[in-house]
Image: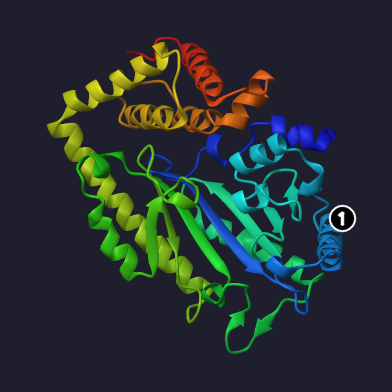
Amino acid sequence: MSELTDILSGDAGFWNRGGPRNDIVLSTRVRLGRNVSGIPFSETIDENSMAFLTAIAGKFSSTAPDQSERILLELAKLDLHEKRLLREKNIITSEMESSNNSAVVLDAARNFSVLINDTDHFRIQVIRPGFQLNEAFTLADTIDDELNNSAMYAFSDVYGYLTPNPANTGTGLKVSVIMHLPVLTVQKRINETVHPVRESGFQITGTLGNSGRIIGCLYLVCNKRYLGVSEIETIDVADDLVNRIIKLEDDARDEFFTTSKRELEDSVYRSLGALLYARRINYAEALEHLSRLRLGVVMSVIKDTEVMFINDLMVRVQLSHLQEFYGVRFRSILDSDDFRAMFLRDELKKTGELNV
């Protein structure tokens, strides 16, 4: 399965590419949830209906108007490591990782993916590095029109696109922006973002799965309203909201650098030292140190290092990425902690002294 091998072993992804305002915004994701008329929703779907959805996805994969290469992966044919790696790469969801009744269409250039039988029958997903909301939505909308040629969507003139969860009925559009807000976090000023976020019909949470736990000062800003608003309205509100949060963090960074430069440098270099010399480090601790390192790169405390390099490390310290990199299967969590520490030491040493 050479196509899968290329996907699993390749490092092409949004995290190691540059993008607008990637000093604060790691990625922008747009998802469009679509369901096929007359087919049971995912929780009650039967084998024949799943085969029908897979056939639609196969037709969509083989008839790209621009002759681009698309790959259809049926998750039942993958092992646990392969599925976890796809989830760590943000190609599939945690629900799909634990399911054998799902599939995914991947654009070979990794511009988009279509998730099959996740919560919805189809979820069109576009992820862009940095803050690229309109670009992501434009591509998702194009793919939506193309997929609609092969599938009759469940749609109501009154309620919009129908979904298994009534709360999601309407546009089916979910906008998610991952933001790095270390100074607002340190200064305990995140609450300044909460009211305008909620007032706009959005929410701000941590990025760790469904727990919403905040690690590495990384936050997920996403919409909660789907009914009674248009796609364009959602995009416009998200654009305004994220730009307001960017300004808050920008201003906080400027003030912090002016008034607490030594504290900033000390924090960054302590984390650098921990990463360079630790012999065992868990995932959460690694992200916390990499978060400080990322701020150090952005604020030029550490020079001649690209922020995409730190983004890349944040992804590759995950368990299955480490297993794939070293070609091993860990016997325990402690094994993964040992290999994570070794990986970070080796990767950081490749950059020399990081201009300390």
Between 52 and 304, the residue placed more toward the observer is 52
Picture coordinates of residue 108, whole percent (x, y): 75, 43
Count of numbered badges drawn on the protein: 1
Picture coordinates of residue 52, whole percent (x, y): 85, 66
- Is 167 situated above or below 29? below
Task: Indicate the secondary structure of the residue bearing disc 1.
Answer: helix
State the residue at coordinates (81%, 60%): 57
Its colouring scheme is rainbow
Report if residue 111 is visible in the image: no
Q: Quadrant of residue 141?
A: bottom right
- Is 148 situated above or below 112? below
Q: Quadrant of residue 352?
A: top left
Which image quarter is the N terminus in? top right
Report if residue 115 is visible in the image: yes
Mark 1 packing: few (<14 Cα in 10 Å), some, or many (20+)? Answer: some
State the residue at coordinates (31%, 70%): 199
Between 254 and 227, the residue placed more toward the observer is 227
Picture coordinates of residue 142, whole percent (x, y): 68, 64
Among all residues in the image, which is located at the extreme bottom? 158
Q: Which residue is mark 1?
A: 62
Among all residues in the image, which is located at the extreme left? 259
* Residue type at tag 1: Ser
State the residue at coordinates (47%, 14%): 345
State the residue at coordinates (83%, 52%): 67
Horizontal placement of 337 versus 293: left or right?
right
Picture coordinates of residue 163, whole percent (x, y): 62, 74
Which image quarter is the C terminus in? top left
